[in-house]
Image (cartoon, helix red, strand yellow):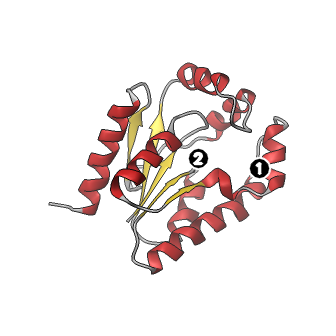
Amino acid sequence: MHFVFMGVSGSGKTTVAERVARELGLPFAEADAFHPRANIDKMAAGTPLTDEDRWPWLRELAGWIAAHDALGESTVMACSALKRSYRDLLREGAPGVHFLHMSGPEEVIWERIAARTDHFMPPALLRSQLETLESLEPDEAGREFDVRSDPDVLVREALAYVETVLQPS
């Protein structure tokens, strides 16, 4: 099984995903680390990425999932996965991809982005990400999590979801 923590920048997906991966001893990938320099430069300059910018990046992420799946390893990834079509491409990497959507009010996420100093994505791009975001559809494996919860609570809730998927009753 593969677990992609999705959501807009600043939603806490990396914070929660890293802790879940560490707790379960699963390989972890931060999707931002896979972006080519041109994508990072574009976002840092305040220009939203296009689908054409994202497709090669998403294919590389699907390849990472596929490589671990071929080894019989479950994985955890933090990736925006904003559109259904992006999630569909990630699912091409392997069966059993679940999306944990870190979701919350724009003002909460805006405050988080504005407060951080260690990320290339400027707060001005939040609006374009929110406009691009497509919520999980009923036929997509996954669950939504409210980012207004304390990170420790989110980690516990995410772990409970992941463990249920890994060890169904």
CA separation, marks 1 and 2?
A: 14 Å
Residue drawn at x 34%, y 44% is 158
Residue 126 coordinates in the image, percent (x, y): 67, 31
The disc placed on residue 82 is: none
Residue drawn at x 74%, y 39% is 120
Residue 4 coordinates in the image, percent (x, y): 47, 54
Which residue was labeled with disc 1?
50
Which of marks 2 and 1 precedes in the sequence?
1
Above-or-below relation of 91 to 9: below
Is 147 situated left or right of 162 in this image? right
Q: Quadrant of residue 19?
A: top left
Is 150 situated left or right of 62 in this image? left
Quadrant of image for the N terminus: bottom left
Whether residue 47 is visible = no
Helix, strand or loop status at disc 1: loop
Above-or-below relation of 163 to 128: below
Mark 1: amino acid? Thr
Quadrant of image for the C terminus: bottom left
Extreme bottom residue here?
70
Q: Quadrant of residue 154?
A: top left
10 Å neighbourhood of mark 1: few (<14), some, or many (≥20)? few
Residue drawn at x 78%, y 47% is 40
Is 123 situated left or right of 147 in this image? right
Which residue was labeled with disc 2?
80
Above-or-below relation of 29 to 120: below
Residue 48 coordinates in the image, percent (x, y): 77, 41
Q: Nearer the viewer, residue 155 or 58?
A: 155
Mark 2: amino acid? Ser
Residue 119 coordinates in the image, percent (x, y): 69, 37
Helix, strand or loop status at disc 2: loop
